[in-house]
Image: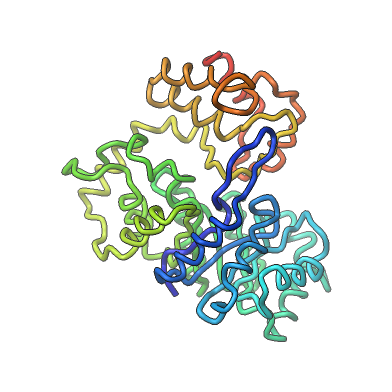
Amino acid sequence: MTRLGFGVLRLPSEIRGKEIVYDEDKSIDVIRYAIDAGIDYFDTAPSYCGKRSQSILGRAIAGKRDQLYLSTKFDTNGPDLMNQFENSLKELGTDHIDFYHFWSMKLDYFADKGLAKGGPMDQMTKLKEEGLIGHIAFSSHDTPENIMEIIRRGEGRFEALLCQYNLLDRRNEEVMAFAKSRGMGVSVMGPMGGGRLGRPSELMDVLPDGTSTASAETALRFVFSNPDVDIALSGMNTRAMIDENILAADDPRPLSDEEHKHIDAVVEEKKKLTDLYCTACNYCMPCPAGINIPEVFKIYNYHRIYGLTEYARRQYALIGADGDLDFQNASACTGCGLCEKQCPQKLSIREELKKAHEALA
């Protein structure tokens, strides 16, 4: 199994008005390119990419299923588990799932419903006994303490964990070590902060010699320097991104103590990044008011983090029917709150949208 996994949640797409439109042909091409390049772990979910991720992945892997490990998820807020599981098998074109996750699970759900007699955990266990599931797993954005309690209450039935981890967000280091001590595999999401750490302009000169910027190489080398990480999932949507990430994942050099110290110093300077830690996962989209929330936050952070205020204001001014950015600016927010219910980072999106508009309009 390759330690670089493909997160199938940021496939090639474009914003058309209020709608995100996914390019299926380009998506299939990118996935097959990744397979041919040696990536063998693909992680999806029923709701990714406007509920098209599983079906697109299923088309892309036709004839190649035996070469791959497939990971998908049970949405605890959706229909019953068996209904979702059968639909996943159908859309993926497979007869089994290698890693089946409780998706974004919280402790209170697991304790109340997940462990109920005849409930989701019992159902997953039965599916595993029948050979339809290879490994029972869960992903979570809960507190580190609660994630560890989920593992404890799972009584050894969990075999893998998916959690967030990158050089800006290290809160789950103890969680990952605890999971490994219980014999579980660990995969991490957001190793490059939703792409933020893969762009040279975001964190300059991270390595001490100044020869490397905050690229995929730096971000992935940091993640893989943690011995508790087995797989890092990256949402990739171009061939170039795949090539870059594979190069970084194949780099056998661990980060040195000096490099770690330098990264810590740079991250400390950029602590404000975590104040509005939008990973552009698009869970908040589409916005009923027509706002491209991740794009607004990206522009806002040019002002907040890097002091590029005039540039940010020029970009913000392009938003609207007469501008180059075909969506509404933050003033269109109606305060409905649907976005906040979907946000895995639990951001105060409505309040941040107000701040963005006040700063940039």
Q: Viewer-proximal residue, 282 or 58?
A: 58
Horizontal arrangement in the rendering, residue 85 relative to residue 279 (left or right) = right
Q: Is 51 above or below relative to 302? A: below
The spot of residue 145 in percent (x, y) is: 57, 53
The spot of residue 42 in percent (x, y) is: 54, 66
Q: Viewer-proximal residue, 110 or 229?
A: 229
Q: Residue at x 58, y 22 (%)?
A: 319
In the rendered image, which quarter is residue 230 located in? bottom left
In the rendered image, which quarter is residue 229 located in? bottom left
The spot of residue 142 in percent (x, y) is: 62, 50
Q: Residue at x 55, y 52 (%)?
A: 11
Q: Viewer-proximal residue, 50 or 77?
A: 50
Q: Residue at x 19, y 44 (%)?
A: 211
Quadrant (top left, top right, bottom left, bottom right) of the C terminus: top right
Horizontal arrangement in the rendering, residue 328 relative to residue 231 (left or right) = right
View extreme (bottom): residue: 130
Q: Is 197 above or below relative to 174? A: above
